[in-house]
Amino acid sequence: MTCLKNFFLLRIFPLIICVLWVSSPIDAGQNPDEVTVLYLHGLNVLKSEKRLIMDCHLWTVERCNGNNDSWQPLSSLGAEPNRRRIILAYDSTLDPREFETTRGVTRLLEGLNMYCRRDREQKCRIVAHSMGGLTVGFTIANLPNALDFYNIEYIQVLAGAQGGSEAADAAPHLINAADKTILENPLVKSALSVLGIELSLTEKLRDFLSTDAIHALELDEAREYDHGNNQGIIFYNVFAIKPDVDKGFLKGLFPPKYDGIIAPHSACNFPSIGIFMECGRHEVQQCPEETLRPPHPTTTLSREELINFITGVFRSQSSTGCNDDEKTTETVEPNEGQRNHPSFDKMGENVGHVEIKGYLRYLLGELTN
């Protein structure tokens, strides 16, 4: 299935790009000295127009668009002189890798064709958060000779989900638990309370966990594309190490360092799942990969196994994922073109997955070292 999907992508991507290239309007207001910053938000249960408004407020952009319509043409979006801030709002309940008007990859290509074309002497930078990192990584990897057409200076990713999330792998098991009324179990209630889940709303919970976007963030699914194919564009990654919630169900899913949703293997774009301490090349003590992840989404768990999974009993090893005698020391390095952002702590920022968005204002400025 993966081979067929990649075969299809290699052929459909150039066609989509060609259509958007020809149809994209000329932005007469941009001059060669301007750098446009394109921003891709992450997964959110809110409608994307609400997400758009929230991010505009965070960036202190006076006007994002005329009528809060997130699908309004990009030419109508507000911007500041010499450093335009364009928020590429997309429907984050859908798989961002598919080609439809409101999905992430289409919105990014639309933005690149309008604000980042070499033949128009334009230039841009891309900033992404969470699932936005998966969106831009997937797009660039499937964009042959990207720098021949687009003048992308670099890409900055905050807590990116390029390699997926352990929490997404858990979603099918939570749906199964809801179907079997396991959510009423006192131990399960206690474990899930840290997520802020209102258990009486199991139908809404099931609907959310069943979205295309959650499936796209599963570990194996997110790693389907060639993460080493950066087309010569540097990705500067920032990862967080302070979980918004550091107990119960979530803690049992992740390696020791994580931000509540994303672990460093994903945010720093490493080739494999494991315990990593920073974004760059370094030595680590690794556990066998299979001990570092929840049961595969397609695995059918019994009622008892589901309860053990949700309450964390399934992880009988130490908090580092395995026993000391199982660990091996090795030198690891991220995929090609992936670097730790030079202005942030290489050991991770002491903030949570949502808190890290507070750095967006900084990333609008020049990259410093």
Image (cartoon, grey):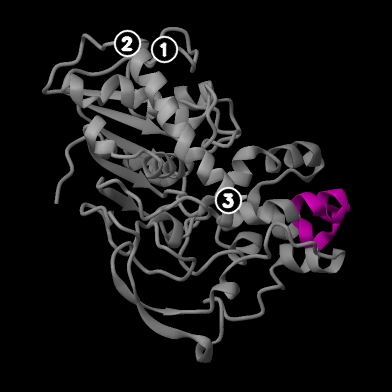
The kind of residue tagged 3 is: Thr
What residue is disc 2 on? 25
What residue is disc 1 on? 73
Residue 188 disc label? none
Is 300 covered by the magenta stretch?
Answer: no
Identify the residue at the far right of this view: 180
Cα separation between marks 2 and 1 = 10 Å
Cα separation between marks 3 and 2 = 35 Å
Where disc 2 sits, the SS reads loop
What residue is disc 3 on? 2
Where disc 3 sits, the SS reads helix
Lower sequence index among marks 2 and 1: 2
Cα separation between marks 3 and 1 = 33 Å
Tag 1: Cα neighbours inside 10 Å, few (<14), some, or many (≥20)?
A: few
Label 1 near label 2: C-beta < 8 Å? yes
Where disc 1 sits, the SS reads loop
Q: Quadrant of residue 328?
A: bottom left
Q: Main secondary structure of the magenta part?
A: helix
Q: Is residue 236 left or right of residue 139?
A: left
The kind of residue tagged 1 is: Pro
- Magenta stretch bounds: 174-189
Viewer-proximal residue among 237 and 134 = 134
The kind of residue tagged 2 is: Pro
Which residue appears at 40% of the width and 69% of the height? 276
Identify the residue at the far bottom of this view: 325
